[in-house]
Image: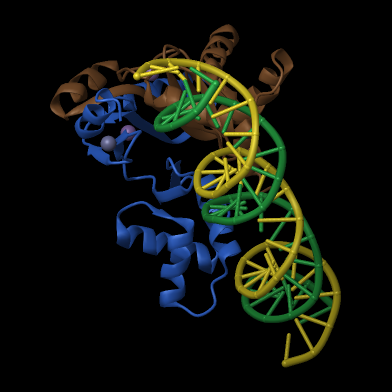
Chain colours: A blue, B brown, C green, D yellow
DNA sequence: TAAGGTATGATAATGATAATCATTACTGCA
DNA sequence: TGCAGTAATGATTATCATTATCATACCTTA
């Protein structure tokens, strides 16, 4: 019964694993065309959606509105500047215990989480106070 | 030097405070027209952006791609079903300590954070396993 | 009041994602 | 092996939130 993966889904999974970082659907589309003949953009979106529902791919939305995808096994979070968009990776993640609790307290099967901090980098804060 | 707020920004702040919940820019636009004559949609977006940079309003992006806004003072997070979109509010938030640390370790002025869990609600998980 | 700067709003442009739909590939069975 | 039914694919179009334009209204100050 467990949805077997399509060829496209397998390719996307493999590429995401090789990359080891998050990538947008559009960029993924370009990458895939680079490797094989005939990959439709619609299929990229469909596959990512299916993989997300399968619990193996996660997504988050950037400030510019585009979503980026990665394997769920990557637990990486960021600190992002609201002004210039500079994004600093964070090592720590203090939510795993809560995730485990929720998994039982709420009737929910949790696949992944997003965590991101927003503010101003020192440079932008400086310019901001200067009245720019 | 601190940017004084415009009339539109004040109205939006007031409405967000009155609501006490997150709301999209589009819905905010409708609400504002309901109260005052002549509020442009562009101004709503501009004001929200300014208030975000001012550190008093926060935003997060829903699965359908639209952003919702609220006062930063509201520290509310969610557990969302990837299939049906059902969203359950969460009470706890275990990231404040980390936020304080980051504020000093990284050279960054942090205004707010987003935290969200994704997975399948019990109903959708059931249907999913059934092969739907 | 006149000048300069800022805010506003109507409108068009942008761009990522979702929906269509005809075609192709696969699966199980006669 | 041949066929019917079903799922997957891809080219294309539609959708829709957000952003960019630009002319106008407003406000501050000399
Ligand atoms: Mn994490
Ligand atoms: Mn929180
Ligand atoms: Zn910055
Ligand atoms: Zn659900």
Q: Is residue A88 found left or right of B34 in the rendered image?
A: left
Residue B34: % across, % down = 73, 16
Residue B43 location in percent, x, y? 57, 29
Toward which corner of the image does residue A72 lie, by quadrant? Answer: top left
At x 42% / y 42%, what residue is drawn? Answer: A62
Specify the farthest residue to the left: B105
Q: Quadrant of the N terminus of chain B?
A: top left
- Residue A67 left/right relative to A93: right
Q: Quadrant of residue A112?
A: top left
Relative height, residue A121 to residue A101 (above, below):
below
Question: Exactly how many numbered labels are in the figure?
Answer: 0
Q: State the image coordinates of residue A48 (x, y, percent, origin top left).
A: 51, 54
Q: Give ligand 2's quarter of the image.
A: top left
The image quadrant of residue B97 is top left
**Residue B86 visible, this angle:** no
Kindly tell me whether residue A125 is visible in this rendering: yes
When the figure is inspected, residue B16 is found, relative to residue B61, above or below; the finding is above
The residue lying toward the viewer, choosing from D18 and B119, is D18
Q: Which residue is found at the position 54% from the left and 15% from the top?
A: B7
**Residue B10 image position (x, y, % from top left):** 52, 13
Q: In the displayed structure, would residue A33 be above or below residue B130?
A: below
- Residue furthest top in the image: B18
Q: Nearer the viewer, residue C28 or A79?
A: A79
Is residue A24 depicted above or below B30 in this figure? below
Indicate left or right for B48 with D11 as reference: left
The residue that appears at 26% across and 23% down in the rendered structure is A129
């Amino acid at each position: 019964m467990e949805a077997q993966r399509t060829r496209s889904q397998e390719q996307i999974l493999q590429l995401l694993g090789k990359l080891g970082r998050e990538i947008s659907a559009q960029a993924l589309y370009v990458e895939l065309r680079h490797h094989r003949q005939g990959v439709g953009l619609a299929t990229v979106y469909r596959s990512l959606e299916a993989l997300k529902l399968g619990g193996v791919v996660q997504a988050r939305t950037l400030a510019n509105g585009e979503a980026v995808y990665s394997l769920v096994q990557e637990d990486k979070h960021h600190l992002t500047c609201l002004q210039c968009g500079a994004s600093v990776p964070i090592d720590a993640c203090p939510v795993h215990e809560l995730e485990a609790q929720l998994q039982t307290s709420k009737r929910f099967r949790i696949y992944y989480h997003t965590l991101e901090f927003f503010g101003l980098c020192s440079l932008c804060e400086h310019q901001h106070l200067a009245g720019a």
